[in-house]
Image (cartoon, grey):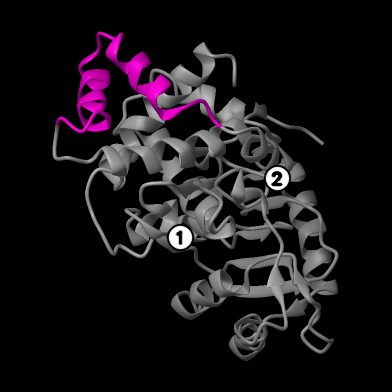
Amino acid sequence: MRFNQLLCGPEWSHLSPIVKGKLPILVSAFYGDGMLTKVAAAKPVGAKLLVRLPRPAGAIPKLLPNDPRKLLSFAKKNPGVEIFVHPRIHAKIFASEGQALIGSANLSTTGFSGAHEASLLTKDAKTVAALRTEAEKFIKTAYPASILYLERLVQAIDAGKASVQPTPDAAAGAAVAFAGQVGNPPFESFVAWLAGQNSALAKEVHSRCSGKKHNVSGHAYSAYHGLSVLFRGDPTWARSLIGQNWQGGRVVTGLDRIRSFVSQNPGLIKNKRRGSWENSYLPTSLGGPAKRSGGAGIGLIKRMMVLLPEYLKSVHLI
């Protein structure tokens, strides 16, 4: 086999040409809502998608490896994509007729975030054909996933008979639990650090954190503690955000991680001023109820995604 490139940190830009290519086959143990959205936006033609979920004819386990609600939404909006499931699939192969990727990255925002994973990219015709053959073998041993089947899984979740295990998109795991147990530095320490920074961005966030602008110190308090736990659980990703444009692609892509983290860790961040993070000021796009709006919405979150990692690095927490 011949490969063109070793990708230490594959990104969506590497996967996108495959999804948009001819007859793409996507085999992945896990998936995330953010990446499914990107796949849908690419409008794949003749695509096949294989992921890990239980056999349609079998009993529904109490713990599901993926969230069927996300897949159900995707399936309804993309009827042209053939979806298959297998309870033990672990491979990650993405292949169109022109190129292919194989490696450790799942079909998730975390997997294609530019960190943590390694993939081999090939455009060699024989190698692409061989990988497509292997992917088709997995498809042949899998089970077609109908809308009715996915709805049955969702009903089991709604009835409390099944739940979803944390996925790679949570960007959390044991490290997040550790961060939550140890606790974050006091909010006031972050505010003091901001006061000593000279950038216009730091001054803007400082004015918000100190309540001098729009009276949103409560908003910023929630955002600080929520993001700190998330960043401490994934320090490599957090450090990659330092120096980024707060409106840039890497920051925007990171919002998918926040939404997934919030939805899978309800009530984790308790705000002594406003209750838990997701029940105070987070908009629905970040996993909140949008009961309120303001500084802890997307604008402040994006700004803090650039500044907060720098602060946490300065105090040796990432």
Is 188 inside the magenta-drawn segment?
yes
User: Which residue is disc 2 drawn over?
Assistant: 173
For residue 237, the mark is none
Left or right: 256 in relation to 162: left
How crowded pointer 2 is (Cα within 10 Å; few <14, some 14-19, many 20+) is rated as few
Q: What secondary structure is marked by label 1?
A: helix
Per the picture, the main secondary structure of the magenta-coloured stretch is helix
| Residue range highlighted in magenta | 184-212
Q: Answer yes or no: do the residues labelled 1 and 2 have beta carbons within 8 Å?
A: no
Callout 2 amino acid: Gly
> At which x and y percent is residue 256?
46, 49
Callout 1 amino acid: Thr
Judge by depth and name the residue closer to the eye, 64 or 11. Answer: 64
Judge by depth and name the residue closer to the eye, 54 or 123. Answer: 54
Q: Earlier in the sequence, mark 1 or mark 2?
A: 1
How crowded pointer 1 is (Cα within 10 Å; few <14, some 14-19, many 20+) is rated as few
Residue occupying the point 73% across, 32% down: 3
Is 287 inside the magenta-drawn segment?
no
Residue occupying the point 15% across, 30% down: 212
The span from disc 1 to disc 2 (Cα, nearest Å) is: 23 Å
